[in-house]
Amino acid sequence: MPKELYFDISSENSGGSLYRIEQPDGVSFLYNHSTTDPKTDEVTVFDTWYVSFEAFWKMLSRDPKWYYLHPLFVHPEQRDFVREQLKSVDWKVHPDKKWQESHQRQWKKVLSDPEDYYRS
């Protein structure tokens, strides 16, 4: 089952990589993610399967401040979709203007990286 990096995002206490996996019966998505317990520094790793990118996105965007996570990669197929989603967010939920601008720059960078940025 060849896998392709499709979405990569992190935060202070969690992060994960979504992979698109071609299977005999179609495409599925594997989210390999982890959380860190801030009190013990213990890391717990999970694998969660999604039937579609839309299902993954629904989970991710349940966090009303998802856009303040730290994006590392967005597959070119989903960049227009993510750009559209970012148009309706309220950056001012965080009062620090420099923090807002820092996250906006990171999304802009990730959404304009070369398509083969993470390919080996």
Image (tube, rainbow, N blue to C red):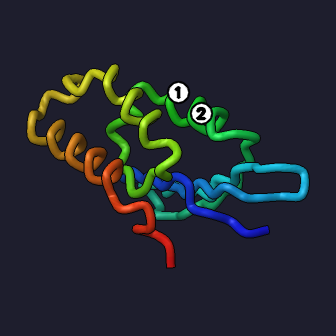
Count numbered badges in the picture: 2
Residue 58 in sight in this render: yes
Q: For the view shown, which residue lies furthest in the bottom direction?
A: 120
- Callout 2 amino acid: Met
Classify 10 Å Cα crowding around label 1: few (below 14), some (14-19), many (20 and above): few
> Vertically, is 5 above or below 107?
below
Which residue is painted at 36% across and 62% down in the image?
114
Q: Secondary structure at mark 2?
A: helix
The x, y position of residue 54, in whole percent, is 63, 33
Residue 37 shown left or right of residue 2 in the figure: left
**Percent from the top left, x then y, of residue 37?**
49, 55
- The answer for how far apart the CA atoms under marks 1 and 2 are is 5 Å
Q: Quadrant of the N terminus?
A: bottom right
Mark 1 in CB contact with mark 2 (< 8 angstroms): yes
Which image quadrant is residue 80 in? top left
The quadrant in which residue 99 appears is top left
Residue located at (39% from left, 28% from top) = 84
Q: Position of residue 92 (x, y in %)?
A: 19, 23
Query: Mark 1 belongs to which amino acid?
Result: Arg
Query: Where does the image place residue 65, in percent across and percent down from the top left?
Result: 37, 30
Image disc number at residue 62 = 1
Q: Secondary structure at mark 1?
A: loop
Q: Residue at x 49, y 52 (%)?
A: 75
Taking the spot 44% from the left edge, 67% from the top edge, the residue there is 116
Vertical comparison of 67 with 31: above or below: above
Q: Quadrant of residue 21?
A: bottom right
Is any part of residue 14 visible from this angle? no
Q: Which residue matches tag 2?
A: 59
